[in-house]
């Protein structure tokens, strides 16, 4: 498995996005999540990316149970988690980047994971009322306390990254980045490369659009997030399926699954890009790893761009409600 650097640490070029361990895209079990972790470890995938809010701790507990069942596995792993999303007394979502909140949440994550320190701790949603430099300083104090080895931010703008990084080194920015979502190329890919920051790409297979088996309409209807996501709503969904048929055909011609080719494309966008696909399927995970091992030429990249040019995807990546929190810098 090829490697990438996150801060001063080196890890696999492919990670696991562990939101799928918490029923977000469909029902799963802890046994199934652990089977994926078993295979990942066998195949050399060492980065695990989770959050305190994935199933309200369920994802972290599944990872912690796997670590307990595999003594010694922690060595060599790169484990990341996040905090910063919370709820007020009325149940409304809000963001809290204060030291008191972030430290309490990190302590709870460490307990669920069964470890003393995470390798990377992200601000899951930046609280815009607080200067980015102050938030970075807050996160730096947790590094000083030995509770995390490095800090990161999720879904921020390049300008916010620069302000934060000037106060305390930012090891990683997590952003949605794929052939379906090219927004990071409007400054974030470049800023991360310039500053030596890893770009951790979530949803690198476009929430299944960039696979051989896109999620079906019945499952979309039963998933509150997808059912209200513009790209998964009609007529956008049908239009998107029609377009990605050409991508699936190209992948087959290249000897890869569509998901594998999507991962290979993401990795070829820069040595600092690290995709973290999520899955509940062991066989699908093998396809993703196949993409991490593929080599693409400039001609291959051109053919991919020809079938899925920038802006091909119909519908915004988030609904109005889903856009609350992420920084949109377009």
Image (cartoon, rainbow, N blue to C red):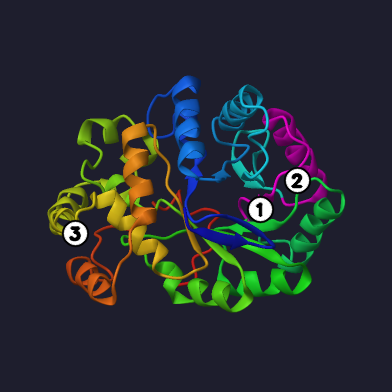
Q: Which residue is mark 1?
A: 123
Question: Which of the two residues, 202 or 222, is positioned nearer the viewer here?
Answer: 202
Q: Which residue is mark 2?
A: 102
Query: Does 4 appear above or below 259?
Result: below
| Magenta span includes 108 | yes
Q: Are marks 1 and 2 in contact (CB under 8 Å)?
A: yes
Looking at the image, residue 199 sits to the left or right of residue 106; the answer is left
Question: Which of the two residues, 17 or 44, is positioned nearer the viewer here?
Answer: 44
Mark 1 Cα within 10 Å, few/some/many (few <14, many 20+)?
many
Q: Is residue 325 visible?
A: yes
| Magenta span includes 101 | yes
x, y percent for residue 90:
63, 33
Query: Does 90 appear above or below 297?
Result: above
Q: CA distance from mark 3 to mark 2?
A: 45 Å
x, y percent for residue 316:
33, 58
Q: Are marks 1 and 3 in contact (CB under 8 Å)?
A: no
x, y percent for residue 67:
63, 29
**Precedes in sequence: disc 1 or disc 3:** 1
**Magenta-colored span:** 97-126
Q: Helix or strand or loop: what does disc 3 sit on?
A: loop
Q: Which residue is mark 3?
A: 254
Q: Residue at x 78, y 51 (%)?
A: 98
User: Which disc number belongs to residue 237?
Assistant: none
**Precedes in sequence: disc 3 or disc 2:** 2
x, y percent for residue 206:
33, 52
Looking at the image, residue 288 sits to the left or right of residue 111; the answer is left
Q: Is residue 127 visible?
A: no
**Precedes in sequence: disc 1 or disc 2:** 2
Instruction: Name the quadrant containing residue 39.
Output: top left
């Amino acid at each position: 498995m090829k490697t990438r650097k996150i801060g001063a640490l080196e890890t696999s070029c492919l990670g696991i996005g562990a939101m799928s361990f918490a029923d977000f895209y469909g029902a799963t079990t802890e046994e199934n999540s652990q089977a994926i972790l078993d295979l990942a470890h066998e195949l050399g995938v060492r980065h695990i990316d989770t959050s305190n809010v994935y199933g309200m701790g369920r994802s972290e507990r599944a990872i912690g149970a796997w670590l307990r069942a595999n003594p010694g596995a922690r060595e060599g792993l790169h484990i990341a988690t996040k905090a910063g999303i919370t709820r007020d007394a009325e149940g409304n979502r809000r963001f809290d980047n204060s030291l008191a909140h972030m430290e309490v949440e990190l302590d709870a994550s460490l307990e669920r994971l069964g470890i003393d320190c995470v390798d990377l701790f992200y601000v899951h949603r930046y609280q815009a009322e607080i200067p980015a430099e102050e938030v970075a300083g807050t996160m730096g104090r947790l590094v000083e306390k030995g509770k995390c080895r490095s800090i990161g931010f999720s879904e921020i703008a390049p300008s916010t990254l620069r302000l934060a990084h000037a106060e305390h080194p930012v090891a990683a920015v997590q952003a949605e980045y794929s052939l379906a979502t090219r927004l990071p190329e409007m400054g974030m890919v470049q800023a991360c490369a310039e500053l030596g920051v890893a770009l951790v790409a979530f949803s690198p297979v476009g929430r299944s659009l960039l696979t051989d088996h896109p999620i079906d309409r019945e499952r979309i209807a039963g998933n509150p997030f997808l059912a209200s996501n513009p790209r998964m709503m009609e007529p956008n969904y049908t239009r998107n399926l029609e377009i990605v048929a050409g991508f699936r055909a190209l992948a087959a011609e290249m000897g890869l699954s569509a998901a594998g080719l999507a991962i290979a494309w993401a990795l070829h966008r820069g040595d600092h890009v690290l995709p973290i696909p999520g899955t509940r399927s062991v066989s699908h995970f093998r396809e993703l790893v196949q993409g991490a091992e593929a080599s693409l030429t400039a001609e291959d990249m051109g053919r991919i761009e020809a079938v899925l040019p920038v802006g091909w995807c119909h519908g915004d990546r988030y609904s109005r409600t889903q856009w609350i929190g992420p920084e949109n810098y377009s």
